[in-house]
Every structure is written in structure tokens, then in C-alpha cells.
Image (cartoon, rainbow, N blue to C red):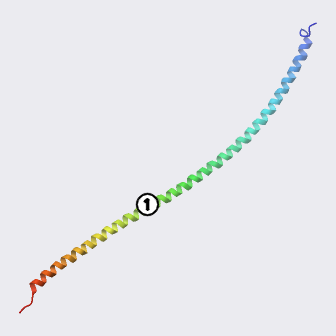
Amino acid sequence: MCPVSCPATYGFLSHRWVQKFDGDMIELDTDLKEITEKFHEEKNRMQKLEDYFDNFRLEELEVEMLELNATANALMKASMTKTKDDAANHVQRCFRGHLARKEVAGMKKGKKGKKGKGKKK
């Protein structure tokens, strides 16, 4: 008359364990569904934030590129202006040198001409 050897006891104990197992599995399944739902919500939120910050980074890069383009254009314009100014200065120096040499040559001719003409008596 051992309670362990009785088949009815096995059936009762196994039925209780099955019910406990089913209850635990239902609870775990509910928890899993809640966690999965929270995971998907957080995943969507994270995706929105990533999109926002990616767009923000792109806007920052665009602004930085525009600033760099403006700086490059200003430097190129300054370089072109300097080149033109240098060329204009060179032309002006050459022309002034030409005028100065012409003036010096004219003064030399004038002295020679005066000596030779002199006053007739």
C-alpha cells in the first residue's frame, strides 16, 4: 500500500505537474509577447532617432561643404586678383621704364644739339 506504487497517484501527480507546466508556459509566453512588443517599439524609436541624426549629420556636412566652397572661391578670387595686380604692376613698371629711358635719351640728344649749333658771329 505504498502511495508511490499506486497508478492513481502517478496520474494525479503527473496531472498537477502538467497543469503547473502549462501555467508556467502561459506566463512565460505572455512575458515573451510583452518583451517582444516593447522590443519592436524601442526598435522603431531607435530607427526614427537614427534617421533624425543621420539627416542632422548630412545637414551639418552640407553646411560645412558650403562654407568650404565659399572659402575656396574667396581664395581663388583673391589669387586671381593678386595675379592680375602683379601683371598690371609689371606692365606699368615696364612702361615707366620705357618712358624714363626715352626721357634720358632725349636729354642726351638735347645737349649734343646745343653744343653744335652755337651763336654765329
Residue identifier under label 1: 76
Specify the farthest residue to the top.
1
Q: In this view, does 80 lie above or below 117?
A: above
Image spot of residue 75 (x, y percent): 44, 60
The C terminus lies in quadrant: bottom left
Residue at position x 40%, y 65% from top? 81
Identify the element where label 1 is drawn.
helix
Q: Is residue 5 above or below residue 90?
A: above
Left or right of 104 on screen, residue 22: right
Query: Along the line of sight, which residue is nearer the eye, 98 or 121?
Result: 121
Image spot of residue 7 (x, y percent): 90, 11
Query: Along the line of sight, which residue is nearer the eye, 21 or 105?
Result: 105
Left or right of 104 on screen, residue 35: right
**Quadrant of res 90:** bottom left
Image spot of residue 41 (x, y percent): 74, 42
Residue at position x 65%, y 45% from top? 50
Q: Which amino acid does label 1 sit on?
A: Met
Residue at position x 75%, y 36% from top? 36
